[in-house]
Image: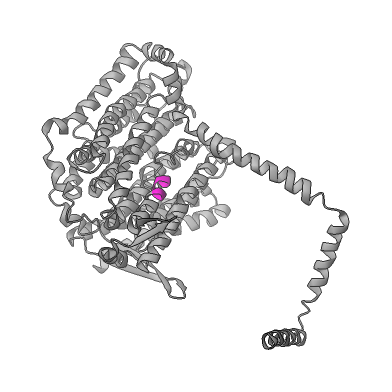
Amino acid sequence: MQTELTLFSVAVLTPLAGAVVAGLGGRFMGDTLAKVVTIACMAVAALCSVGALCAAWLGGFPHAAVPLAQWVHAGGFDATWTLRFDTLSVTMTAMVLVVSLLVHCYSIGYMSHESMPTYRFFSYLSLFTFAMLMLVSSNDLIQLFFGWEGVGLASYLLIGYWYDRPAATAAAIKAFVVNRVADLFFIVGIGLIYVLFHSVQYDTIFAAVPAVLNTPYTLCGVSFRMLEVICFLLFVGAMGKSAQLFLHTWLPDAMEGPTPVSALIHAATMVTAGVFLMARMSPLLEFAPGTRTFVILIGATTCFFAATVGMVQPDIKRTIAYSTCSQLGYMFAAVGVGAYQAAVFHLTTHAFFKALLFLAAGSVIHAMHDEQNMFRMGGLWKKLPVTYVVMWLGSLALAGVYPFAGYWSKDAILNALWASDASYSHYAWAMGSITAFLTAFYSWRLLFLVFHGKPHDEHARDHAHESPAVMTVPLLVLSIGAVVAGVALAPFYIGAHQSAFWNGAIVNAPANHIMEAFEHVPALIALLPSLAGLAGIALAFVLYVSAPHVPAALARSFGPIYRFLLNKWYFDELYDRIFVRPYAALARVLWKGADEGVVEGLPLDIVRATRDGALQAARLQSGSIAIYAFTMLAGLVVLLTVALCG
């Protein structure tokens, strides 16, 4: 047991060393040191995480905690820096580190043409990874919140890495602000947990759940179950981090950062944090049916919304970004019906094929000299054969085609939605099945526009070339995961061995039998998502290979619908009118009216009197103990006189 705990601790803490050395040492010793140190640390961490996973697998996934240091000690509140070792944390740690290592290696080639030093970039990548590891290995909500805010900070630094580009800095600020809105709800939820359970430590909270099931919480004269309120607040926090409907607007703009950043955010960090939080808090969510219904509605609607927007996006990275948003909707819908294991399974398989798709897109962008518009590409499959093949593999996994990874995890979610008797679960199944068709359509739309058809620019196509080995090798490794991760992990994550595998790290209440029920859906229902995916591929072939003039004609014929989807359902414009413009108008009034009109308009004599009064008051702070003692004595005399006379 001690061996796997040691390996786990090294895996979690080593990326921080890489981030610090790269950030401080790289400034004085150059980019080479930053690259070598960060990749070496990530390699050590990844090997240790896989070793810890294998050792835990052989040992039956015991539960343990690794205390590192005293952290917060205030009054009766104590929080120690402790690493939690269970199935959920060790599997998430291994997945995050393996994907992050491949992204680090890929970044050497992708960032090789940067004019500015890149030691900051590699330091930020390692910091991002460390923050996510703190989140998934936390043993209490305070440490989880530290990692939660850490990935938010790192995403801000990485999205705005090209700080000389106004669009990048604006996107970084937008991501930061939108997540702060959601994090306010999350903080309140943590506060209510402490009020209810008198602790923020997981084991203490989970053990006390049966005793507080009906504890009321009164707001504005209306009484709610406190557990429902807490779970709702936690989910709103997850909505922001995982870009669910209404709090998703930061996600497409985050594509302004370098492509490796997009791969790390969308595959292994940040956006998966919300799903992890829901799985970790499953002992609470099991007894909050109202919140779970809300989760189903948001997840299913997000799933469909993002897919419709992805159908018409011209930008290759934004198309894949909306795909992430859509797949996260699947995961939350699974959480809503209590199939937390299926949600985490899809999170894991999605990490491999989504990282693969983003890095393959980066390879295309690299070959096309930073061009991201798919309509300005075409005919690249002979020039980029490796990228073309791995993009096919990633798209097959994303579309859920048998036997690729997405087939096992996405179909498990859809089957669970059909088998569940929860409110709106069949609505979620319908949205998910339609989305399966749309996902296949926009995935092959991307493939056909980029790699097939007539080149938009013959000169650019002729000069395109395959990426160097430092970029293609990570693609090949990820493609293996996109092919085999589903069939290899299914028996343990959702199959016959799932109960022993999770070993209490994810909890299903005694009345929740969804993990058995989803295996007994009718054959036609189980087959429908695959048929929908194949239909989507066929439609994309017809529209973008057989009759490439049809999409433009459809866009003209259905102009309002096309513009509605192209403008992302006008959420940005709506928020601009509701929040941004009123806030800017208020700021302008305070600036012009209060600051310039009142403060700067004060008579000069008042300003001078205020300054002189402040100077005289400052002289009272003489530093003389005798004067201070006399002042205190005088005050005490006055206080006693008032008290006695009164």
Question: In the rendered image of this protein, does residue 4 appear above or below residue 171?
Answer: below
Outermost residue, right side: 605
Outermost residue, front side: 646
For the N terminus, the quadrant is: bottom left
Answer with left or right where residue 361 lies relative to residue 521.
Answer: right
Could you tell me which residue is drawn at 40 percent across and 11 percent down? 553
Q: Where is residue 171 shown, x and y percent of the image?
A: 53, 39
Q: Where is residue 370 shown, x and y percent of the image?
A: 49, 29
Q: Is residue 646 visible?
A: yes
Q: Quadrant of residue 3?
A: bottom left
Could you tell me which residue is drawn at 57 percent across and 41 percent down? 169
Q: Is residue 37 visible?
A: no
Q: Nearer the viewer, residue 537 or 504?
A: 504
Total number of numbered discs in the rendering: 0
Q: Nearer the viewer, residue 309 or 245?
A: 245
Question: In the rendered image of this protein, does residue 125 appear above or below residue 319?
Answer: below
Q: Nearer the viewer, residue 209 or 401?
A: 209
Q: Where is residue 443 shown, x and y percent of the image?
A: 33, 27
Q: Quadrant of residue 502?
A: bottom left
Residue 198 included in the magenta stretch of the image: no
Question: In the rendered image of this protein, does residue 384 appear above or below residue 485?
Answer: above
Could you tell me which residue is drawn at 23 percent across and 47 percent down? 339
Q: Quadrant of residue 503?
A: bottom left
Residue 237 included in the magenta stretch of the image: yes
The part of the chain drawn in magenta is 236-241
Answer with left or right where residue 248 lies relative to residue 521.
Answer: right
Instruction: Name the main secondary structure of what is drawn in magenta.
Output: helix
Answer with left or right where residue 560 lies relative to residue 550.
Answer: right
